[in-house]
Image (cartoon, coloured by chain):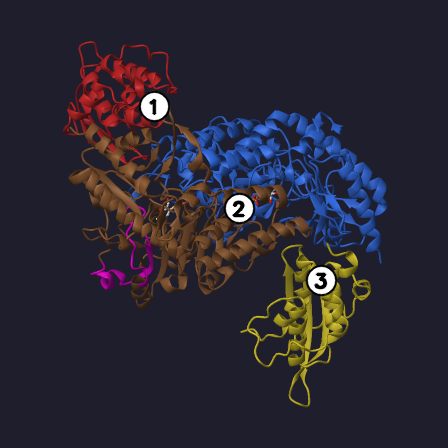
Chain colours: A blue, B yellow, C brown, D red
């Protein structure tokens, strides 16, 4: 049994079916998956998978529509999940939880609805050089239409936001979009500090919390966010569901994004009357089973305790940074902050002269799943001066043994591709 | 699961370690195209100069490769540059088609003139890639980019 | 065993866990669910539920991103489903299948991407009086921005499209939006005829096939559609996934809808390069497990054979129309076409003076699930001169016994609320 | 599962069959508000006339109900119209709050002045609705619409 700072990883691993299957290894011998790509998508505990199966087997019906008891049951399951998700992130009201298909849609919703109404040629949006494409491209699409400027908060050498010029950068800005935790560098950004400065400058703040919510105790009010997006599948939850949280007053002021069923009170030939929150932004049949699954995921994490989750990750990240440097040696560069407490368990690496794609191929032969690529952050790749990195990312089901095997396989990859 | 040796044949590693025809050509006269592998962020730049030979065929007179990528994409580009130099564009098309059919890619819009049965020579070493489907894009990136460079743009 | 025109309903019922559970009835005695709300959302066979659980238990990873074998497996499962879904609707290429979160998003995508580019103050969009809000409100939202006109194809007395004036209505129209099968009236519309006229007038055609694809053999080419939308959850599939099909050439000409990961080839600070189809329209992590589930749903229906499905529904609809009229009597109005072969198994009813909400309450006491309401078609409700209807809708797991029980319970409701 | 009799008490059916105060009032002087139940398409219209009484309180001097709906929403509207006529707006607010708390709805922004403990009289018959959560919206639609009608719009 491996216990790291409060999490019983062996027991946790047992909850994840995929981590307990024998898979064919490179030598034909069965091997267990060592999953180190949770920043891309997490694995799912049995509790989440079962919640969805059970929904389909016992309670499936469309929501908000039927008067029969099955439809009421389905609606109650959905709304119950909404409430638990709201309290998981400290949202003042569950009406502020808007279900989307993923974090990407949530940020596009903000760009189109809020940005489409509030941004013109004289305006500017401020984002950071470490944003994920999901918090860049929606603004580029809209900027091409509306003519506003996009500004970038630069980075320091060790992969933190360089806030020296923040006040100057904020001048004339209407919205700041900032990732709370980088999916490449692991950097935990000082969202509260940026939000305070943004508010003082009259701007609102959209937080990309896709990497934060799964790993760090999150309270939207304490963060000072106006809008915050995250995604279910990185949070032990299913694919097909994401969340936009927003201050009710702000969401109320925004026009609807998608049109269709449920987001209306009335439709006439000459126009429609918009429904109240959260329905206003939930056109069409929502991802019902997925919301139920996300509710179960949030329960699972709440049972572990997000403080324990965070403590486990800080401690395992510290172990990994130390071990990888020791075992792989000088050839290894780990991008981002050096201090484990200042970052999440996302380790983007340069392994000697080996290309990340080749590294991940060698690792795959040992059943180790890491991601090689640009991680949907091409502007950041250019800042780092690389095309791609090899990224290992840690979660609650990872332990020191996983890290040890990673280190060994990295050495093999490095040696194989050394010129 | 196929082993690493299937993928990383010695000749591939050789081209990766000592890539042929790295560099740039002046454009114009040379044509240039950029290729992306959205999966891994690889970028390849192909510069190609052509001239008309005595038979009236267009021939690859010079080629240079820029950009960055993994061993497979770099080796494939290097082997390609060596293989196509001096060849007519029809021969290049045949070679490309032959390589792709080795990778089990259905070649779209293949016209009768294209012959997928030409001998691949060293390029045969890329055959192991077929067992690693994700890497097929790496292996074909240079070839698709070359095709774009020699296609007259309108 | 009930065999209706080729489907073995008893065997099919056995595949649907929810139809085999004892539920608490009004008298406290356990009762089986009689589910007659498939037009709202269908139930799911074990094969679909299992395909998704198995995905999570064995193959879960993010797609299009990882080079490791698990990610390849997940991507192959997704792309395999895309291919089977493409051939299920006769799409010439699987690249023309765009996964969305539901049919509503698919139609909003068309409105925003195609409409946002092609519609201005001098243009017009032609839709029908029987459209679902999902094919009305997106156009109303866009019309408020762009100033184009929305025209309506009217209805005949028996709930068919009145095409007498079609050519005049089409004059100056750039897009025709038409539901292939009404979710209220069951009417099967002559899409091909409308498409031919629309094309002759220079307009393109968006088909809302949310009700068609689950029930009637569908071939997008034969329909003459340019764009066609449907939704997974009405098709034995999961919530959280929908499909937009479009002619490749047309989709190629349209700008992206949502911005983010996967829909780009490159992102620079000064702009982005769009990826090719289908990725161009699939920003962010797709509903992977849901797509796998929808693939299993399509397999299930293909195994039954869509011709057999349609034959079963025509025959059961004929039985239902006959039986309900006989048993309930003069007090019953069934909206829409009188001829079962001209419609799907959607029966919107007026039951004497009883309000649909009250009728459905009485039915619910007998474990019968029908929908009472406006069915997201308020303009149609106004044309019919009602606020709401009681809608019973049939699918492959319904049989004559279900219809008989419905008839009996309708009599009780009618009597209870007769003034 | 609760039975139909819990929901459809005799007094509810009576108000449904013979609704009180159906009709319209002239606006102005009367105020008018429309309410929708998006679930089932029900629409209710409340016309309400007020006047100031000798104590300086605003009193519901007349009320009329239009629109269509199910037995619960129609009966609730009818019972409401009978219950509020002649009452001061403060009394109406207390009654509304009392009804909602019977329906287990948390009343938001309730100020100290509002008393949820007033006697409901006939309205007590709506208590069965609480066992049918979907119908709560039907039962409260008229009340929310009335509240909107008497709220000064700015
Ligand atoms: C005809 C029609 N179109 C569109 C839709 C919308 O489907 P979804 O809610 O899955 O987007 C529906 C179902 O509600 C429908 O019946
Ligand atoms: C920081 C960040 N933002 C946004 C996203 C997008 O999430 P999704 O693909 O679920 O929309 C991701 C994950 O890919 C991410 O890491």
**Coordinates of residue C343 in the picture (x, y in percent):** 28, 52
Secondary structure state at the residue bearing disc 3 = helix
Magenta stretch: residue D85 in it? no
In the shown orientation, is residue C129 left or right of residue C220? Answer: left
Q: Mark 1 against mark 2, which lies toward the viewer? A: 1
Check the image and report above or below for A242 versus D129: below
In this view, which residue lies farthest toward the bottom? B54
- Where does the magenta region start and end? C163-192
State which quadrant residue A399 falls in. Answer: top right
Give the CA separation, mark 1 to mark 3: 66 Å
What residue would you read off at disc 2? C287
Q: Which residue is mark 1?
A: C27
**Residue A204 rendering spot, x and y as whole percentages:** 51, 36
Indicate the secondary structure of the residue bearing disc 1. loop
Disc 3 target residue: B129
Nearer-N-terminus badge (1/2) = 1
Labels 3 and 2 within one chain: no
Q: Are marks 1 and 2 in contact (CB under 8 Å)?
A: no
Secondary structure type for disc 2: loop
């Amino acid at each position: 049994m491996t216990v790291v700072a409060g999490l019983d990883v062996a027991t946790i691993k047992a909850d994840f079916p995929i981590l307990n299957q024998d898979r064919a290894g490179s030598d034909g011998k069965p091997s267990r998956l060592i999953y180190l790509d949770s920043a891309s998508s997490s694995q799912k505990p049995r509790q989440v998978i079962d919640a969805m199966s059970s929904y389909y087997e016992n309670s499936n019906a469309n929501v908000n529509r039927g008067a029969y008891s099955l439809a009421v049951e389905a609606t109650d399951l959905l709304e119950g999940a909404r409430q638990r998700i709201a309290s998981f992130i400290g949202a003042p009201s569950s009406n502020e939880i808007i279900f989307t298909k993923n974090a990407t849609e949530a940020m596009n919703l903000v760009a189109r609805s809020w940005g489409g109404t509030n941004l013109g040629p004289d305006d500017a949006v401020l984002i950071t050089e470490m944003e994920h494409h999901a918090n860049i491209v929606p603004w580029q699409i809209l900027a091409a239409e509306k003519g506003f400027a996009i500004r970038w908060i630069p980075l320091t050498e060790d992969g933190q936001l360089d806030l020296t010029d923040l006040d100057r950068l904020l001048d004339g800005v209407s919205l700041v979009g900032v990732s709370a935790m980088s999916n490449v560098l692991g950097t935990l950004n000082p969202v509260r500090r940026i939000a305070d400065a943004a508010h003082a400058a009259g701007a609102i703040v959209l937080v990309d919390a896709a990497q934060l919510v799964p790993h760090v105790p999150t309270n939207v009010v304490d963060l000072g966010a106006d809008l915050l997006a995250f995604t279910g599948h990185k949070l032990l939850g299913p694919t097909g569901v994401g969340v936009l949280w927003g201050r009710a007053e702000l969401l109320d002021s925004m026009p609807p994004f998608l049109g269709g069923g449920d987001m209306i009170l009335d439709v006439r030939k000459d126009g429609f009357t918009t429904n109240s929150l959260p329905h206003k932004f939930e056109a069409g049949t929502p991802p019902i089973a997925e919301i139920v699954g996300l509710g179960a995921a949030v329960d699972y994490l709440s049972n572990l305790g997000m403080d324990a989750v965070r403590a486990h990750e800080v401690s395992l990240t510290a172990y990994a940074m130390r071990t990888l440097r020791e075992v792989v040696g000088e050839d290894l560069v780990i991008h981002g902050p050096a201090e484990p407490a200042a970052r999440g368990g996302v380790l983007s690496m340069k392994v000697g002269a080996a290309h990340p794609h080749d590294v991940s191929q060698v690792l795959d032969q040992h059943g180790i799943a890491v991601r090689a690529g640009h991680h949907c952050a091409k502007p950041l790749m250019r800042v780092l001066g690389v095309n791609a990195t090899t990224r290992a990312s840690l979660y609650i089901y990872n332990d020191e043994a996983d890290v040890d095997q990673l280190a060994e396989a990295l050495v093999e990859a490095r040696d194989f591709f050394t010129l | 699961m196929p082993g690493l040796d299937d993928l990383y044949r010695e000749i591939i590693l050789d081209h990766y370690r000592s890539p042929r025809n790295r560099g740039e050509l002046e454009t114009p006269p040379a044509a240039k195209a950029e290729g992306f592998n959205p999966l891994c962020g690889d970028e390849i730049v192909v510069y190609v100069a052509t001239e008309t030979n005595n038979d009236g065929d267009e021939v690859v007179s010079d080629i240079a490769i820029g950009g960055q990528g993994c061993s497979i994409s770099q080796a494939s580009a290097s082997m390609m540059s060596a293989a196509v130099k001096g060849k007519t564009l029809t021969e290049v098309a045949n070679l490309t088609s032959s390589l792709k059919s080795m990778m089990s890619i259905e070649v779209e819009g293949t016209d009768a003139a294209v012959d997928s049965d030409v001998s691949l020579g060293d390029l045969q070493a890329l055959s192991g890639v077929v067992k690693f489907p994700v890497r097929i894009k790496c292996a074909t990136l240079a070839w698709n980019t070359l095709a774009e460079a020699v296609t007259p743009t309108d």
